[in-house]
Image (cartoon, helix red, strand yellow):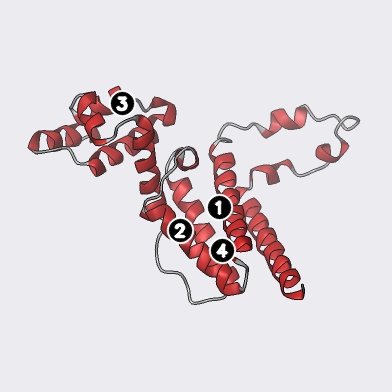
Amino acid sequence: MSMRESSRAGARRGSLRPDTVVDTALALVNHGGLESLTMRRLSDALGTQPPTLYRLFHDKDALVDAMADAVLAAALGPLPQADWEARVTAVAERLRAALLAQRDGARIVGGAYTTRHPTLAIADSLLAAVQDAGFTVDAAMCAITTVFSYVLGEALEQQGRTDVDLDDIKASLCDDDYPHLARSPLPALLDFDTRFAFGLRTITAGLREQLTHQHAT
């Protein structure tokens, strides 16, 4: 049974559930990208009418917020019994994996504003780790927003770079105009796993340095 047939069968059997709407919306995005998601297309896939959806989600922004929660829920789970850096790294890696598992996941989460459990639980896990390290409350909040923004930005960059032609880039690089780029290994630009690991290590090293400075003052 196709997604459309399954959704319509569910709509016929009883009241439409918000989680069914969210799952169908995410499936539509996986198929056609975030731009393809409209309330009309979504209602067609569910075998219902737009007013039914608006009774569950007052507008598309509210639906995207719920979609963001569903994406972030995949990053939840118990953390290892380890030091703060390992815990921060674990949360960041899970968050990245959750964003990349959904087409346009970073755009969905980045364009949402939600205060439901998944978002709050991820923030709380990061906050617990950096506070256990000894950061002040203000510094801890800056630390977790730095980590979250980095993960989101890297995922957004990766999901938006699906059609990069390195040969075209290399052909446009003149030694006289761009000597350093011309002699650099361009494939490294698209080695997102290495980029992510390097950046995350840099951030945790910077946080560690901040912590040392905080304790010295």
Sequence order check, earlier mark of 4 and 2: 4
* Residue 205 pos. (x, y %): 70, 65
Q: Residue at x 32, y 35 (%)?
A: 25
How would you rate the neighbour count of disc 4 (Cα within 10 Å): few for under 14, some for 14-19, many for 20 or more? Answer: some
Alpha carbon of mark 1 to alpha carbon of mark 2: how far?
9 Å
Q: Kindly identify the amino acid type of the residue bearing the numbered disc 3.
A: Met
Mark 4–mark 1 distance (CA, rounded to whole Å)? 11 Å
Instruction: Please name the residue shown 68% across and 34% down the image.
Output: 166
Pointer 4 with pointer 3, Cβ within 8 A: no
- Is the residue marked by circle 3 packed among few (<14), some (14-19), or many (20+) residues within 10 Å? some
Name the residue nearer the viewer: 94 or 175. Answer: 94
Left or right of residue 97, residue 180 in this image: right
Name the residue beneath numbered marker 4: 89
Q: Are marks 4 and 1 in contact (CB under 8 Å)?
A: no
| Dot placed on the residue nearer the N-terminal end, 1 or 3 | 3
Q: Residues within 10 Å of mark 1 (few under 14, many from 20)?
A: some
